[in-house]
Amino acid sequence: MQVPFLDLKIQYKSIKQEVDPAIQKVIDNTAFILGESVSNFEKAFAEAHNVKYCLGTSSGTDANHLVLWSLGIKSGDEVIIPANTFIATAWGVTLCGAKPVFVDCHPESYNLDPAKVEAAITPKTKAIVAVHLYGQPADMNKLQEIADRHNLFLVEDAAQSHLAEYESKKIGTLSSASSFSFYPGKNLGAYGEAGAVVTNDDNLYNVLKMMREHGQSKKYYHDTFGHNYRMEGIQGAVLGVKLKHLDKWTDGRRNAAAKYRELLKDIEQIQLPKEMSNVKHVYHLFVIQVKGDEKNREEERNKLQQFLTENGVATGLHYAIPLHQQKCFQDLGYKKGDFPVTEQLAESGLSLPMFPELTYEQISYVTDKIKEYFTK
Ligand SMILES: *Cc1c(COP(=O)(O)O)cnc(C)c1O
């Protein structure tokens, strides 16, 4: 049996009847940039997250930049982000000319560890970016307390956590502004590049809206700096159709995660991901850890991955090299050992196949192979 890491084709086939005409309509109307399909989607996405405003953007990375840029983050400022995240979280900071300051993740949530944030704050710190990684919300109450105490902005990178909840509230609404990605492989994926920013703040919305489109208040009146970060009409149309199915697809992911947990619970050699008690996790990824000491855990993980690959099961590493160990951030002066929890996850973490349409047969094949590996 072959189990792909992700299968976008099944989902396309299931909505082809709806999505093809929606795309055709954009082409018929030649409404290629923003337009009705994007504003309809923005309205629906804002409603789904119980937030006042949503602005469609050209990507999640651009949304990350737009959020920090609109808050006035600039050269000389520092912004705290987790060491354990996708690199685009850091680009939001560097594109503002500011310096990313990394903080280790929590051993259970894998998100920014609030207990370690305060030690990283300096007089230059302006903001904290909470990333809801793998689909699990970060500890927003504790992070908000810290942000308030030090007069910092708190924002969310929600690229992996559409419709996730923290204390029964939708993520994306728990800070000044939040960025989403609709990269095709995300929980809500476009048919190309796309992202969004959501906020409840009227003033910030006006600034964001200008900045997304060349800083203009009306055509050719450029009141502020900006860029071209607009969403394409076709992406708005695709996302509008797909958003209607997102609750069902989220259930599919949560059911797949529950089956993995059930079938893997007795394997001593691995650690399953924890779901924190006050959240609704939306399982963008299901990341297990292969137990082992510091010397052999990476090798043990790689051997399991190799065995699964040979048996037709595709897996991923999220993320194999933490941000502080990336070559591009060498000048920041971090070294191996600075963030032990993040480093452990990088060396022992393995992401299992995860998508809403994963079948019980596929899941039990994956878990049987994992059992076979550890008993042979
Ligand atoms: C995917 C992702 C992004 C970037 O989104 P793009 O749409 O690919 O630019 C940002 N942050 C995180 C945590 C992501 O996973």
Image: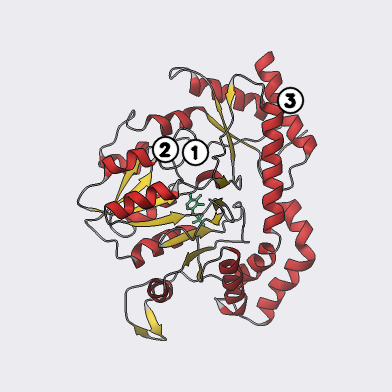
Q: Is residue 299 something that shows in the picture? A: yes
Q: Nearer the viewer, residue 255 or 360?
A: 255
Mark 2 and mark 3 residues within 8 Å of each other at the beta carbon: no
Q: Position of residue 113 (x, y in %)?
A: 40, 40
- Residue 1 quadrant: top right
Query: Along the polypeptide, which appears first: circle 2 or circle 3?
Result: 2
Q: In which quadrant is the C terminus drawn?
A: top right
Mark 2 or mark 3: which is in front?
2
Q: Which residue is mark 1?
A: 109
Asked which secondary structure carries label 2, the reply is loop
When the figure is inspected, residue 99 is found, relative to residue 51, above or below; the finding is above
Asked which secondary structure carries label 1, the reply is loop
Q: Which mark is residue 105?
A: 2
Mark 2 and mark 1 residues within 8 Å of each other at the beta carbon: yes
Query: Along the polypeptide, which appears first: circle 3 or circle 1?
Result: 1
Q: Residue furthest left?
A: 123
Q: Residues within 10 Å of mark 2 (few under 14, many from 20)?
A: many
For image coordinates 22% across by 47% down, the residue present is 122
Q: Residues within 10 Å of mark 1 (few under 14, many from 20)?
A: some
For image coordinates 57% across by 79% down, the residue present is 35
Tag 1: amino acid: Ser
Mark 3 and mark 1 residues within 8 Å of each other at the beta carbon: no
Q: Nearer the viewer, residue 46 or 148?
A: 148
Q: Which residue is mark 3?
A: 368
Asked which secondary structure carries label 3, the reply is helix
When the figure is inspected, residue 7 is found, relative to residue 75, above or below; the finding is above
For image coordinates 52% across by 56% down, the residue present is 171
